[in-house]
Every structure is written in structure tokens, then in C-alpha cells.
Image (tube, rainbow, N blue to C red):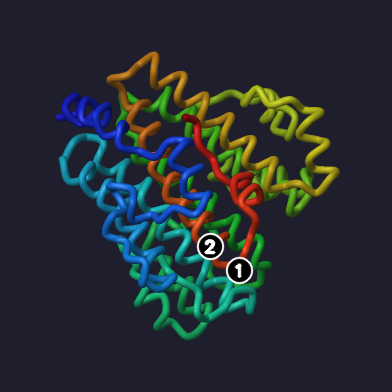
Amino acid sequence: METYLIVRLHGLIQHLLRKEDYEWLLKGRSLRDLPEYSHIENEDSLEEVLNKIDNVLMKRLNFLADLQSKFSPFITAFSDRLEIENIKVRLRQFHGRQDKKSIYTQYAHFTSPDELMEIDNEEKLWTLLQNTPYHTVAPTEEILKDSLEFKEAYLDSCYYAYIRSVIPKKERKELGELLDLEGLITSIYWMLVFNEDKMIKLIEERLHGFKPSFIKVKEFNLKNVYNLLKVDWNLADKLIKQGEISKLMKKLKKAHLELVREKAERKSLSSLFLYYYLLLIKYERDNLHKIVLGRVIGLKREKIKQTLLFLF
């Protein structure tokens, strides 16, 4: 079943959007003109459009998970990053940092959007999360005292510990190394929020999920992570000093995706190709969200294009 799944991916990847598709959309063409998104109507509300984009991603993910291969738990755990997004939305609402009318992704595994919206205080949210892999380290009474930024970093940390734990045993080294790198990219964002020294201390004491399990880092710092991704330190430092954090994160994610592609193409019938495909379909969904939302708020075409992440 595993070989069948990977072979199917080589066909499915041909249906993903290319650079010219994004260029086409940025010039004002309709999403419904794309075969995979033809169910989107011009009259749909913003929420309906975003949900229909999400549904394409979830249909792709569910198809793979339902094949009942040894990769199914990993595919489900990858899908659960949509649930983490929803939890963060609710968390920000409790902190007054996100509109109460924010749109949730209609994805449910350990908890549902409806369940999240029914919770009327933050303590109940963390109590609910005690029964999930997203809240496995800090006691609820302790984390309630922390900043919103720490709480979001904590959710990310628990998530990476969780997804690494479901990698099939024989796939652990190679796939684990790439997931370690993905987690390190997320940790770089939080290093820039908290400052490098504080984040390194937090990883040692409270955010253990960011600590690499499969790659060896002589010393855990920004420069060494950039080296692992073959990203120029001077360019990264320049972007930080200019406050271009979004550009830096895009550059790191693209470097990671290129590395995953390189390894997946070398082992095209392995779990590495599965991970590559999963990243591509998630980035496609994210790109379309950015295009739709960018249009709504009136961003210029070039500004939207700068936020998109694609390889071909």
C-alpha cells in the first residue's frame, strides 16, 4: 500500500498549481477557471471562498490518510497543523489580538471549530487541550500566566514533538531530519520575537519540541540553522536589521522546500516524496488564501506575489 500511495503522488503532483497559474490569478482571473477550484462561485462570500480552498486541501489529505498505509498517522499529524491554526485564532481572541469574526478552517481531529468557538474563557481552552498532543508539557495553571507569544510558541513546540513521534520507525532518520529543520525554522521566528538567547534558554527549559531529534547541531543558534539550510548569514542578518521578518521566513521556508525536493527526487518512492507533496499542497492553500485576502484589502499585485511560496 505504501508503494501504491507514493506512485499515486507522482500523478497527483501534476495537478498542483504552477507559477503561471499564480501569475494568471494575480492578473485578475477567477479561481473557478482552475479545474481543482471550479466549484468556487463569483458570488461566494470571503468565508465561503476560503472554506472551499481549504476543502481542496482537506480532500487531498483525507484521500491519502484513508489509504490506510503505515504513513496514515503521519499524514493525519501533518493535517493537524490546520487545527493548531484554529487554536491560535481562538487564543488570540481571548487576548484581544484577533477579531471575533475571524474565519476558522473547517478541520476537526482532536477538537472542532464549533467546540473552540463555544469555549468562553482561556482556562477552558487549555483544559480541553490537555486531552490532545498540543498541551503535554506545562501545567495549565502555569501557562495561563505566560504571554500570548509564549503560548503560541508552546503550541508549535508540542506540535513538532507530536509529529516526530508518529514517523514510521524505518523512515525516522531522513524524514526526521527534514522535520527537525522545519521546526528549527519556526523556532527562528520565535527567536526573533523573544531574542536569541532567551529562546535558546526556553528551548532547553520549556519548549523541548523545537530541540532537534535527528540532526546534530554543534551549537544551537541562528547562524548554525542558516548554515543547515544553506542560507547566507549576511543576507539573513540584513533582512532582520531591516525588519523584513516575513521575507526572511519565506526565504527559509523556500530553502527548506528546495532541500526536501532535492532529497525527494533522489528517493522518489520514499516517505520523503510524501512529505514533499504534503508541503506543496499546504503551500498551495496558503498561497491562494494570500491572493484572495490580498485582493480584498486592495494590495498591489507585486506585494501579493512577494508573499507567495512556490517552486515551479
Name the residue rendered at 37%, 26% in the picture. 272
Q: Quadrant of residue 223?
A: top right
Q: Which of pointers 1 and 2 lies earlier in the amino acid sequence?
A: 1
**Where is 146 relative to 305, above or below?**
below
Nearer the observer, 15 or 271:
15
Q: In front of the other: label 1 or label 2?
A: 2
Instruction: Pinpoint residue 114: horizontal percent, then vertical percent.
Output: 35, 77
Specify few, some or many for label 1: CA neighbours under 10 Å numbering under 14, 14-19, or 20 or more: few
**Where is 184 relative to 178, above or below?**
below
The residue lying furthest to the bottom in this view is 120
Instruction: Pinpoint residue 217: horizontal percent, then vertical percent.
Output: 64, 25
Query: Left or right of 212: which side holds 116?
Result: left
Query: Left or right of 117: which side holds 149?
Result: right
- Which amino acid type is shown beneath numbered disc 2? Leu
Circle 1 SS class: helix
* Residue 293's disc number: 2
- Which amino acid type is shown beneath numbered disc 1? Glu
Nearer the observer, 77 or 55:
55
**Where is 255 relative to 156, above or below?**
above
| Gap between marks 1 and 2 measured at Cα | 36 Å
Q: Which residue is mark 1?
A: 142
Question: Exactly how many numbered labels are in the figure?
Answer: 2
Instruction: Pinpoint residue 40: horizontal percent, then vertical percent.
Output: 32, 61
Name the residue rendered at 44%, 70% in the picture. 46
Query: Left or right of 232: which side holds 151?
Result: left
Specify few, some or many for label 2: CA neighbours under 10 Å numbering under 14, 14-19, or 20 or more: some
- Mark 1 in CB contact with mark 2 (< 8 angstroms): no
Name the residue rendered at 47%, 85% in the picture. 120
Name the residue rendered at 35%, 35% in the picture. 167
**Where is 279 relative to 111, above or below?**
above
Instruction: Pinpoint residue 100: horizontal percent, then vertical percent.
Output: 53, 81
